[in-house]
Amino acid sequence: MESLMNPTHLHMLVTHLSIFGAILGALVLIWGMITKSHQTRIAAYLLFILTSLTAFINDFSGEAASRTVRQIGGVSRDAIKEHHLAAQFGLLSLYILGGATLIAMIYILIKKPAKTNAINWLVLVVSLWSFSVTARTGYLGGKIRHTELETPVVDSINVAK
């Protein structure tokens, strides 16, 4: 009987959560800042912490996924290496996001400052940066098996002429 999920499957699932969790959390945080909703900002922070925790799973499952993919013919080792290097930076960005979020939550929940705007902006900037880093990492990971990502985009304006 075949296993329902192996580390390679887990890696592909969780990496998407890392990418989309950072941007979704940013959108929730922005909404919380606009509406001045303390609960919405806390929800965004909890989403950031969940997203940051996925970094551990990504790191654990990424090595196993690499071993699996290297056995497939036609897979570029250079693409795997490029993704791995980007992933190290992506992991760091998620750890920084998690750390910044924990510090912000402790500060807001325990000290309850009257003005938390600067903290919210700091976490927002870190989350957007983390999204950009993890999105690039995901793109490079996709290039390992999705060779269509290597195909140049046809300029529709020039095609119409």
Image (cartoon, rainbow, N blue to C red):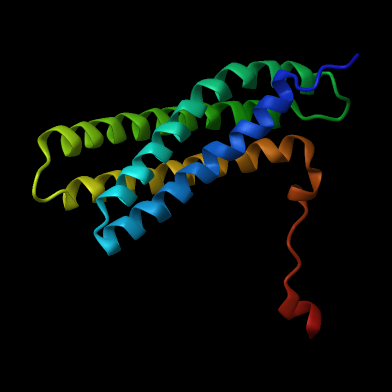
Give the quarter of the image for residue 70.
top right
Screen quadrant of the N terminus: top right
User: Is the C terminus in the top left, top right, bottom left or bottom right quadrant?
Assistant: bottom right
Q: Nearer the viewer, residue 17 or 62?
A: 17
- Observer-nearest residue: 37 or 67? 37
How many marks overall?
Answer: 0
Indicate whether 46 appears above or below 161.
above
Q: Where is residue 32, by image quadrant?
A: bottom left
- Outermost residue toward the right in this view: 1
1 over 40 or under it: above or below:
above
- Is residue 64 rendered to the left or right of residue 22? right
Residue at 48%, 41% (x, y): give it: 133
- Residue 95 on image: x %, y %: 39, 28
Q: Which residue is located at x 61 percent, y 39 percent?
A: 16
Q: Position of residue 147 (x, y in %)?
A: 80, 44
Position above or below: 105 against 73: below
Q: Residue furthest front?
A: 39
Of 93 and 39, which appears nearest the observer?
Answer: 39
The answer to whether residue 123 is above or below residue 96 is below
Residue 149 shown left or right of residue 103 in the figure: right
Q: Position of residue 134 (x, y in %)?
A: 52, 39
Instruction: Give the quarter of the image for residue 11.
Output: top right
Residue at 72% from the left image edge and 40% from the top image edge: 143
Left or right: 14 in relation to 4 = left
- Going by the image, does 81 lie left or right of 95? right
Identify the residue shown where x is 78% and y is 23%: 69
